[in-house]
Image (tube, rainbow, N blue to C red):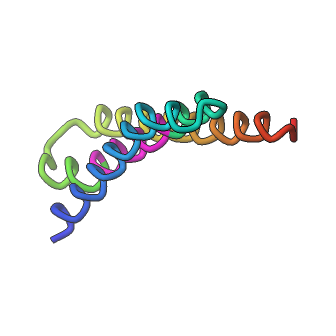
């Protein structure tokens, strides 16, 4: 039961991230960089959730080193995107 729910969750995050990257800058031109970084963070979070909750269960004999490397790189992309989005939002608000 976890695999279908996690697949929908990961897909929703990825599609939401794509939407934010494509539509966000047109609706909020002053927040273009924040939209791109937020979209990157959402896509990376979706990839991480899919890798950690779906792929590991469907392919248990996959190389653990390869699996952990992919999950770690997705997590780093998420953290970078989230941090950059916060910085760009603060810059836009004049707080930095």
**Count of all numbered marks drawn on residues in the image:** 0
Residue 42 is one of the magenta-drawn residues: yes
Return the residue nearer the eye: 20 or 37.
Answer: 20
Locate the N terminus by quadrant: bottom left
In the image, taking residue 96 as reference, residue 18 lies left or right, namely left
Q: Position of residue 59 (x, y in %)?
A: 13, 46
In the rendered view, does 89 fall on the left or right side of 17?
A: right
Which of the two residues, 40 or 59, is positioned nearer the viewer here? 40
Left or right of residue 96, residue 52 in this image:
left
Residue occupying image coordinates x 25% and y 60%: 6
Q: Is residue 13 magenta?
A: no
Q: Residue furthest front?
A: 27
Q: Which residues are magenta?
A: 39-51
Tell me where residue 42 appears, x and y as whole percent.
Answer: 44, 44
Above or below, 8 relative to 88: below
Residue 81, x across and y down, in percent: 56, 35
């Amino acid at each position: 039961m976890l695999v279908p729910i996690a697949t929908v969750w990961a897909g929703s995050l990825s599609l939401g991230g794509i939407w934010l990257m494509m539509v966000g800058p047109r609706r909020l031109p002053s927040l273009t960089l924040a939209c791109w970084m937020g979209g990157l963070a959402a896509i990376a979070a979706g990839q991480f959730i899919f890798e950690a909750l779906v792929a590991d269960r469907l392919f248990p004999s996959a190389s653990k080193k390869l699996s952990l490397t992919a999950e770690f790189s997705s997590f780093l992309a998420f953290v970078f995107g989230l941090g950059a989005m916060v910085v760009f939002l603060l810059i836009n608000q004049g707080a930095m």
